[in-house]
Image (spheres, rainbow, N blue to C red):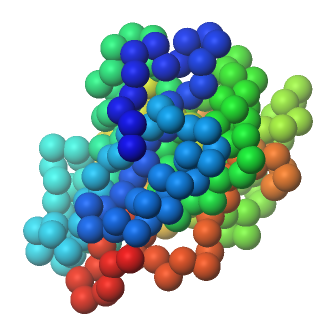
């Protein structure tokens, strides 16, 4: 594992990588480390994931927890709240860096990286910069995302816009987030709280897709990464009583 270095997102540099991983999931950490090494990725940092089993009981009963990051009254149970909190740790890592470190790739530890992963992700991100993206999903759940929520972007054949008023389950195994997007994503939880609606399945804010600039890779063949569906996953939230691998 390597720490992130200053100036990692300069004009001639590749985007740095943040890996979300439970402390106890050493097997997954090793596999991801090997994948990253094979892909030639040396500038990466592990973000310790949040255990769902360690959240206060009120998170599991009513989703009322972690008021400092505005998850109160979202009706988000303990498991998805832990996933959301884990990703918010990654977003805060992006925000905490000095100017010039303006975006990063975020990975969950059940991602599969394709050849040229970091280079391809960086190229896709830079091609989308005129759109001022908050998020660019390097892969997403195409079978679960409603077709009307996937919109073409004129002049950008390799990218689609993800926008859905009722929320969507896109997954979040691999994406790029900007410094601005990291801040806006956390702020966007407030309107959801005021609506009083149940949180959508999408842990990247569901209905907030209407206020965030979210995009995704248009074609499967162009995706730099994908979700490893073969993993019997406790994901990043950690469930009590399940074996951690």
- On screen, residue 231 versus residue 114, left or right, reads left
Q: Position of residue 205 (x, y in %)?
A: 45, 51
- On screen, residue 206 versus residue 198, left or right, reads right
Residue at 54% x, 77% y: name it.
231
- Residue 10 location, quadrant: top right
Residue at 49% x, 44% y: name it.
106
127 vs 100: above or below: below
Quadrant of the drawing holding the N terminus: top left
244 vs 150: above or below: below
Q: Position of residue 126 (x, y in %)?
A: 69, 22
204 vs 127: above or below: below
Residue at 48% x, 52% y: name it.
33
Q: Is residue 238 visible?
A: yes
103 or 40: nearer the viewer: 40
Q: Position of residue 115 (x, y in %)?
A: 74, 47
- Residue 203 location, quadrant: bottom left
Residue at 44% x, 18% y: name it.
101
Q: Position of residue 45 (x, y in %)?
A: 38, 40
222 or 166: nearer the viewer: 222
Quadrant of the drawing holding the C terminus: bottom left
14 or 70: nearer the viewer: 14
Q: Is residue 166 visible?
A: no
């Amino acid at each position: 594992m390597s720490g992130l270095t200053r100036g990692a997102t300069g004009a001639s540099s590749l985007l740095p990588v943040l890996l979300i991983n439970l402390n106890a999931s050493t097997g997954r950490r090793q596999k991801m480390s090997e994948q990253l090494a094979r892909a030639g990725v040396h500038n990466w940092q592990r973000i310790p994931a949040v255990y769902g089993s360690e959240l206060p009981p009120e998170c599991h009963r009513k989703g009322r927890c972690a008021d400092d990051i505005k998850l109160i009254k979202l009706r988000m149970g303990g498991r998805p709240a832990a996933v959301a909190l884990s990703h918010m740790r990654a977003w805060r890592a992006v925000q905490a860096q000095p100017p010039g470190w303006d975006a990063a790739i975020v990975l969950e530890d059940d991602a599969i990286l394709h050849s040229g992963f970091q280079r391809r992700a960086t190229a896709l991100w830079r091609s989308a910069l005129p759109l001022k993206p908050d998020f660019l999903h390097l892969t997403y759940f195409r079978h679960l995302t409603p077709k009307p929520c996937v919109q073409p972007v004129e002049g950008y054949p390799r990218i689609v816009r993800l926008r859905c008023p009722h929320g969507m389950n896109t997954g979040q195994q691999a994406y790029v987030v900007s410094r601005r997007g990291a801040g806006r994503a956390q702020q966007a939880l407030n309107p959801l709280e005021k609506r009083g609606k149940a949180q959508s399945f999408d842990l990247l804010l569901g209905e907030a897709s209407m206020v965030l600039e979210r995009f995704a890779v248009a074609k499967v063949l162009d995706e730099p990464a994908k979700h490893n569906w073969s993993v019997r996953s406790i994901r990043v939230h950690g469930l009590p009583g399940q074996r951690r691998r």
